[in-house]
Image: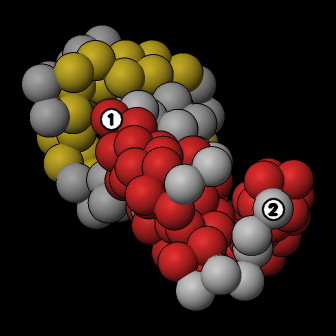
Amino acid sequence: MIWWGWIVLGLGLLLAELATPGGFYLFFFGISALLVGLLDVFGIAAPAWMQWFLFTVLALITLKLFRKPLLRRFREPEGRVVDSLLGEPAVALEEIPPGAMGKAELRGSAWNARNAGETPIAKGRRCKVERVEGLTLEIRC
């Protein structure tokens, strides 16, 4: 393939990575195509079979070495959003006995709530979120 074909292919794969919600797969193939295009400009990867071989090897090696670190760098830790609910006020939507489950409203949404205190929580009472376990709040008044 001609050197500019590799450059166009590489840029196309990089744009496709931006357009899709993928997990950094096309990115490495795009980088590999750009590298093969640069190598072809300098005459290092002359035969077509060598270009395709380098494209494949470079893509797989960069994918293996750099994908996980990139994912770690750009993805937010999973527990972060839920943990921000700690200390927030929640309003009991029903009476909740100690240690029992009920419903509470937090930020305009109804949640499953467990009474973490030793006294019953009356309907309409404001409580504090102490812990979040999945989609269940542990609240105490």
Comparing labels 1 and 2, the label whose residue is closer to the camera: 2
Spatial distance from mark 1 to mark 2, Cα to Cα?
A: 32 Å
Residue 28 visible in the displayed image: yes
Q: Mark 2 points at which residue?
A: 47
Residue 73 placement (x, y as % from top left): 51, 75
SS for tag 2?
A: loop
Q: Name the residue under label 1.
A: 19
Mark seen at residue 11: none
User: Who's the residue at 61% across and 73% down the image?
Assistant: 40
Q: In this view, does 50 lie to the left or right of 25?
A: right
User: Who's the residue at 39% across and 43% down the image?
Assistant: 12
Along the viewing direction, whichever of 77 and 40 lies nearer the viewer:
40
Along the viewing direction, whichever of 37 and 141 lies nearer the viewer:
37
User: Who's the residue at 37% across and 23% down the image?
Assistant: 111
Q: Which amino acid does label 2 sit on?
A: Pro
User: Who's the residue at 28% across and 18% down the image?
Assistant: 110
Residue 95 placement (x, y as % from top left): 34, 17
Residue 137 visible in the displayed image: no
Mark 1, other Cα within 10 Å: few <14 / some 14–19 / many ≥20 = few
Q: In which quarter of the image is residue 65?
A: bottom right
Residue 57 placement (x, y as % from top left): 86, 64
